[in-house]
Amino acid sequence: MTALALAPTAMRRGAGYWLAGFRAMLRFDLASSRAWLATFVTVQVLMGAGMAIIYGFYLGDMPPAAATFLATGAPTLALMPLGMALLPSLIASRKIEGTYDFMWSLPVPRTATAASSFTIFTLLGLPGVAVSLAVAGWRYDLDLRVSAWVVPAVLLASLMSASVGFGIGHAVPDPAITNVITNLLIFVVLMFSPISFPIENFPGWLAAAHHVLPFWHMANVVRDALTDGLVDSVWRSYLVLGIWTVGTWLLAAWAIRRRR
Amino acid sequence: MTALAPPAELRRGLEYWWRSYRMMLRWEMTSLRLVLPVTIMVQILSGAGFVLALGIFFGQVPPRAALFVSTGVLVLTLVTIGLVLGPQLIAQQKAEQTYEFLWSLPVPRTTAALAWVTTNFILGLPGMAVALVVALLRYDLDLHVSPAIVPAVLLTLFTGTMIGYAMAHALGNPMLIAAITQLLIFMILGFSPINFPAEQLPDWLAALHRWLPLAPMADTVRAGLTVGVVEDVTRSYLVLGAWAAASVGVTAAVLGRRG
């Protein structure tokens, strides 16, 4: 851990120092991810591929259009629990175990710690996304037109999800409340979100709410990269996701900078 | 604690059993007081949630799908506590080492089991009622309630609770119990013909469910609420009865054993 062993006299600033801190935190996060990585991928595949199959059982015989819609929701369903549920629970469990304060006592810039979390959680989600899409596509026998837009779409959706989870985890002081929030989020996303179902099926007030919330927009950018003509004005969804990302960064910054 | 008899008194007979049952019921309800409100809220939310979410899944909900979900959620609220929460609570007792203490209480062990079944019934009722009311308000349902609903609900509740009970007592490792119950939720909600007709499952899974207890539970309850939807309900009663008897047998064998 050479990066952590800087002599106290060394100057603690500058891009070089930040990068060294970032690299050290990446290594730290990756090493600690060994404990939960298997669970993560399982949960992701269960949420993504599993839900795509389960929704199909509920719907029975579907026209191909509905099946396409359902299957292209699977990658979004696989992304969402990672950032929005597991990341905040991980932060909450650090608060319970008392290792939370230790994390912040490490001699690295706090932005480097945050950047490391975002990087890890954005990238770790990708295998589960690919598996979910493959299983759902196989189950519904789809031929998807994957465009290059899938890269920014999945990365932004994943980053946004990790940012929201990071913001919740750090801004909510009580770990018990964090867990209630994440459970509620999963419930709402699985039962009442226009990820696997067209937003036209929703009552007006709920559809209006989903224009502001990030879930529908996540599904939109991913679906737009996988299909032709199912999504209109996708730029608006990119914009909303961008706003959620930056907004939750500000929230996290406020929560992290606070001294107790 | 007047109910605790002095050691000289004879500990047998119907009256002693009944008194013990009432005490164990009070014990269960008291020890659940922290989990109770949350559990009932979750039951109500998920019951009503499924009924309402169906409208979002379909847009225009076919009457048959509405009928299946509305009757299926009753089964869900009846069995999830017994199959999922129950084993988790017992696993927790094993982890905290209060498990042995509970069995050292001077009551017949059948009273403890039946008190738990009764507790499940009390916990399940609000969710069941709310789900049914929401379903009736939301969908134009063709329900025909027959007296057969009473044995169907009782047998479903008893079997579900006893399967969870047998599993929790027979398995030693709390982590294993936790993993199994998590998997069970997924199975119950997504891969069992409770909320949707069995023909919407792949053939092999539908065939498997003819021998598992979940589909017969849904069939018997559904047969008590509808006309012409369920065929061959006698078979369902037989399969369910067999599962009930087997789980009672396993529980008796495990609890009868002296440690």
Image (cartoon, coloured by chain):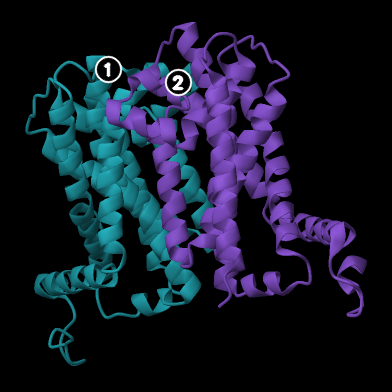
Q: Which residue shows up at 67% across the image and 54% down it?
A: A36
Q: Residues within 10 Å of mark 2 (few under 14, many from 20)?
A: many
Q: Which residue shows up at 36% across the image and 27% down it?
A: B193
- Chain the render paints cyan: B
The tag on residue A56 is: 2
Q: Secondary structure at mark 2?
A: helix
| Image coordinates for residue B91, horizontal then vertical, percent | 46, 64
Q: Are marks 2 and 1 on the same chain?
A: no
Towards the viewer: B117 or A256: A256
Towards the viewer: A89 or A241: A241
Q: Secondary structure at mark 1?
A: loop
Q: Colour of chain A?
A: purple
Q: Which amino acid is tagged 2?
A: Gly
Residue A178: tell me if it is visible.
yes
Q: Quadrant of the image for the N terminus of chain B? A: bottom left
Towards the viewer: B111 or B157: B157
Q: Chain of mark 2?
A: A
Vertical comparison of A202 with B25: above or below: above
Q: Residues within 10 Å of mark 1 (few under 14, many from 20)?
A: some
The tag on residue B61 is: 1
| Image coordinates for residue A189, horizontal then vertical, percent | 44, 37
Marks 2 and 1, Cα distance to the nearest angstrom? 14 Å
Q: Is residue A204 left or right of residue A192?
A: left
Q: Is residue B9 left or right of residue A226?
A: left
